[in-house]
Amino acid sequence: MQCLEKNIYEMTKDYCLTEIIGTLLKNKWFYVTLNGKKSELLKQKNVLLQGSVLAPMLFYTYTNDQPIGTVTRHFIYADDLELTAQLKKFEEIAERLEDTLKVLTIYYQMNRLYPLKTQVCVFHLKNREEKRNLHIKWNNEILQHSDNPKYLGVYLDRSLTYKMHCVKTQQR
């Protein structure tokens, strides 16, 4: 928590705001009620609950110093990070993305962050490459490929037609 408070103070230079946010995040306790019975009182390990109004802003503040590779582009929204690379050869794309992921791994380990739901997708307009997949390793595991990744609630497809999003939206 000290890292987050330090980042907030460095960004705002406002000691009072930093103290208020620090107080909101410390010493959180909870219990669960099931069938009328309460569990024992437990200390919350995560500082914010999923869906908290403060969560996106504080997560961004906590991670605003994460290294971003110079050979890839990135897009960040709340706790979603998208990495992209645009080159002619798929092998070069995979190599550049893996290099960026290696740097991010060190940062994530130092800051006790554990990425989930990491997927790989290729976007292109060449039909002859329609079934091409990138094989990218991260921490000695090949990342899952997705033909239709979901990003910020939108289902994407390889040629960015939004056909899959329309199909999924219609199914709801």
Image: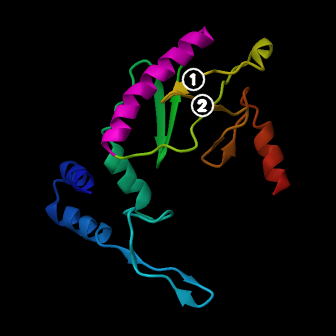
Residue at image point 45% right, 28% down: 101
Instruction: Say whether disc 1 or disc 2 marks the residue closer to the N-terminus.
Output: 1
Residue contact between numbered discs 1 and 2, judged by CB atoms under 8 Å: yes
Residue 161 in view here? yes
Does the segment drawn in magenta span residue 89?
Answer: yes
Question: Whole-Å distance between the Cαs marked 1 and 2?
Answer: 6 Å
Q: Is residue 41 left or right of residue 89?
A: left
Residue occupied by mark 2: 143
- Residue 114, percent across and down? 45, 45
Which disc is residue 3 wearing? none
> Callout 1: few (<14), some (14-19), or many (20+) C-alpha neighbours within 10 Å?
many
Query: Residue 117's image quarter?
Result: top right
- For the record, the magenta segment spans 88-111
Three-letter code for the amino acid on which mark 2 is drawn: Leu
Which disc is residue 136 wearing? 1
Quarter the N terminus occupies: bottom left
- Give the overall secondary structure of the magenta segment: helix
Residue furthest to the bottom: 36
Q: Is residue 17 left or right of residue 64?
A: left
Three-letter code for the amino acid on which mark 1 is drawn: Ile
